[in-house]
Image: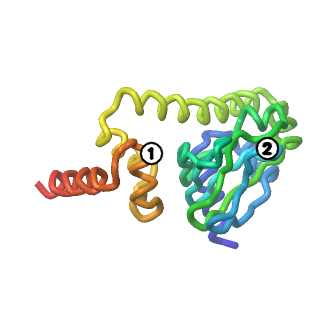
Amino acid sequence: MAEIANLLTEFISRLDLSEEVAQTFAEGGRVATIRRGESVVRQGEVCRHVIAILEGTFEAIACRSDGQQRLLGFAFTNEFVTDYPAFLAQSAARYTIQAITDCTVLLFPYEHTIQWFEYNMETQRFGRRIAELIMAEREERMLSFHMDTPEERYLKMLERCKDLDKQVSLKDIASMINVTPETVSRIRKKILLENKS
């Protein structure tokens, strides 16, 4: 329990909230352990939570009409994740958010989240910030795909998750930066050599 309290304290300290608002934030979420392979949001089901990741890694995957799955992205420790438009509309999620490691999270239900956003001006600003963080990450991923080299895309993922290579498979990293697994291996070797010199 002390470990969860430490994770929560660390997460909240990054949010730059007043003590009062930080307290109401923590009280509004339900701490949960999500095991590897379990989903917190399921494609086609109503998106009921905003998820604060205290520890762990999630992937967002969508199943196309032909049955093929597409990897859309990752969310790491100290980030928020949800299908935000579906959450706000309380409509069916367009993709699944699934744990790829054992995760500790805070689950914020819709009713509480909307009430909390209206608590005062600080929580209203923070609600906008959550939306901005989620949307900015999506925009950055789209721009990076068109503007950055595969090595730059890999380095940006490493910035978000220092243990990327331990938490995400080589195949999934390759899929996210749109190269073959062999290219990811070459990028890793190049970075390793550069760090040694």
Give the residue drawn at x 71%, y 39%: 94
* 2 or 1: mark nearer the eye: 1
Residue 20 image offset from top left, x and y in percent: 76, 43
Under mark 2, the amino acid is Cys
Left or right of residue 137, residue 85 in this image: right
Packing grade of label 2 (10 A; few <14, some 14-19, many >=20) is many
Left or right of residue 5, residue 88 in this image: right
Give the residue drawn at x 32%, y 40%: 150
Left or right of residue 92, residue 128 in this image: left
Label 1 sits on a secondary structure element that is helix
Q: Is residue 1 visible?
A: yes
Q: Is residue 133 above or below residue 107?
A: above
Under mark 1, the amino acid is Met
Packing grade of label 1 (10 A; few <14, some 14-19, many >=20) is some
Task: In the displayed orientation, state which residue is furthest to the left.
Answer: 197
Residue 47 disc label: 2
Contact (Cβ within 8 Å) of mark 2 with mark 1: no
Residue 119 image offset from top left, x and y in percent: 84, 34
Label 2, label 1: how far apart the Cα atoms are: 24 Å
Give the residue drawn at x 65%, y 48%: 67
Q: Indicate the quadrant where residue 90 lies.
A: top right
Reading the image, the residue beneath label 1 is 176
Give the residue drawn at x 78%, y 52%: 29
